[in-house]
Every structure is written in C-alpha cells, then in structure tokens.
Amino acid sequence: MSYSSERPPERVTIPLLQRWKQEGRRVAMTTAYDAVTARITHHIVDIVLVGDSVGNVCLGFDNTLPVSVAMMNHHLEAVARTKPRALLVADMPFLSFHISPEETIRNAGGFLQRGADAVKLEGGSNRVEMVRALVDCDIPVMGHLGLTPQSVNVMGGFKVQGRTTDQAKRLLDDAHHLQEAGCFALVLEGIPAELAARATEYLTIPTIGIGAGPNCSGQVLVFHDILGLIEGYRPKFVRAYANGFQLLQDALSSWVADVREGAFPTPQESYRVPDNVRDEIAKWTPADPS
Ligand code: KIV
C-alpha cells in the first residue's frame, strides 16, 4: 500500500481517539499558533490546538475576548500549511458561536475549509443547540468546561470551578449533555481532580485536562508554558520542561556579542566573488555623473 509522503499513515483521527479512550491510552495535546511551532509539535503530540489563547500568549491581550474569527483564520492557516500529523483543532473565539446556529456553522465550517479537523468551543448546556447544529453538518466538536477563559467576567477572574456540590453537579450534567449532543471529546479546565476523575469515568468520550488532575484521558498545556517561554506568573498546574525564555535570551545575547566583537560573520558564513571581479571592485571609483 502506498501513502502520500505529506500525510504519514499514523495520522490521528477522531475514531482513533475514541479507540484510545477504550484502551486507556493517554492523549497529549498542545497549542500551536504558527508554522514554526506547528512543525515542532505535530509529530510528537496527538492533538494540536490553534487556541484562542493566541490572544494573550502571542498578541498581547489581557484575555481571549478580543480574539476574532479573522485572527483565528490567520493563525489556523499558518498551522494547517504544515499538514499536521496530529489532529488539528481550531478554537471558536468569543462571539463566533453565540449569535445563531447559521453564524456558528459558517464560522466553524470556515475553519474546516482552512484545514482544521474539528473545532472546540467553551460552555455547557447553554451551548448544546450550537453543538447539535455543528455535529449535524459533520463538523466535529470538542467541548470545554470548567474554568472557561471566555467567561472571565462572569467568574470574576480566572478561578478554579466546581468546588461546591452545586457547581460540581452542574459540570457533570453539562458534560453529559455535551456528550449527548455529539461532542467527540471534552477539555476540562481548572477543576478539582476528583470531579475530573468522575467525569472521565462516566463519559465514553475522552476528557483532556488542564489543571484538572491526573485522572483525565489526556492532558493539554499551552506550548509556550511547557517550554517556559513566558516570563512572570506561572499557574500551579503548569510544569515547564525548559527555561525557554532564558535559553533564547542567552542565544540572542551570544549573537549580539559576536556582532559587536566582529566575530560574526566568519569567511565561511560569507559569499565570495572570483579573483578578477574582486580586483575590479578594489579599483572602482565613482563614475562621472555626466
Ligand atoms: O486556547 C487554549 O489554549 C485552550 C487550551 C488551554 C485548552 O483553550
């Protein structure tokens, strides 16, 4: 059997994720917002998310609310051009799935036309109508419950959710309703480990945790957090596997020092002309303007 060289045979698909849930194989998901990060990630992780976290991670916003469909399209297209091996999921930004099923389908369908395999949207039972509309158009949907960053104003900040009995039961009800509506997986963000474990045990679809403890079907962290690229406050659920910020600054400082000392570039890093051209260049004087 021959396969396209651009798409390795082990491409991650939604049926494969469902099988992994049954087999208990844990799923690793991270974010990518451009072609460079996508190429680093997509032969290593199972799911690449073009997250609306691009807003605060890359675009300098305080939260994800200003991120638009046009911005997401721009970043999704860059990632999709790398033809990821991982399942490629595009985040639906604030207001792109709230107004009507028609507008939701058009925005999500646009993501699939740009190369996404699926979309992700935040919210629980209040979003079931939109999830059903998308699934009905063969647009696979990943749900997102718990600390949903687009609800920052309702939550009064980025606070752990589901700590009271009422909140916990509501989250489990929401998870059930999203699965019934056709979601193929759920992100569980910023909730107690026991609650995420109960949801994972109950649901037949995979759960992907972030700040939701170890007993989810998989884990997601933002790429820049895994690599320690973000200076300053680091939430408790983030484990940085490199001090990328320092590493990159050190490399850049070495280059600047070489430039200032005249140690960069060397003859090996420079282009040459043949000897006769070099002699002519040496003899050159400005031509008479007349
Ligand atoms: O936008 C994002 O990066 C996310 C993940 C953190 C789940 O939604």
Image: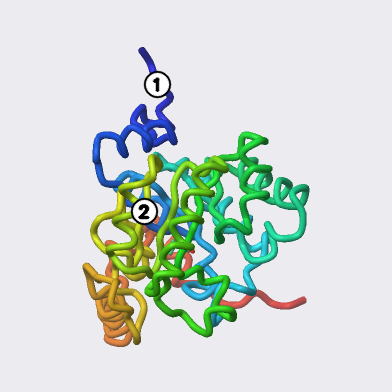
Quadrant assignment, res 61:
bottom right
Residue furthest out toward the top: 1
Is 107 positioned to the left or the right of 143 in the image? right
Q: What's the mark number on residue 3? A: 1
Report which residue position mark 2 lands on: 199
| Quadrant housing the C terminus | bottom right
In front of the other: 154 or 221: 154
Q: Residue at x 37, y 60 (%)?
A: 272
Q: Is residue 126 above or below residue 232?
A: above
Figure quadrant of the N terminus: top left
The residue under label 1 is which amino acid type? Answer: Tyr
Q: State the CA–CA distance, disc 2 to disc 1.
A: 38 Å
Position in image of residue 179 (x %, y %) = 49, 44
Q: Give residue 63's position: percent from left, percent from top.
A: 54, 78
Closer to the chain start, of discs 2 and 1, is 1
Of badges 2 and 1, the one in the foreground is 2
Dot 1 beta carbon under 8 Å from ligand 1: no
Disc ID at residue 122: none
176 up-or-down from 62: above or below: above
- Dot 2, crowdedness within 10 Å: few (<14), some or many (≥20)? many
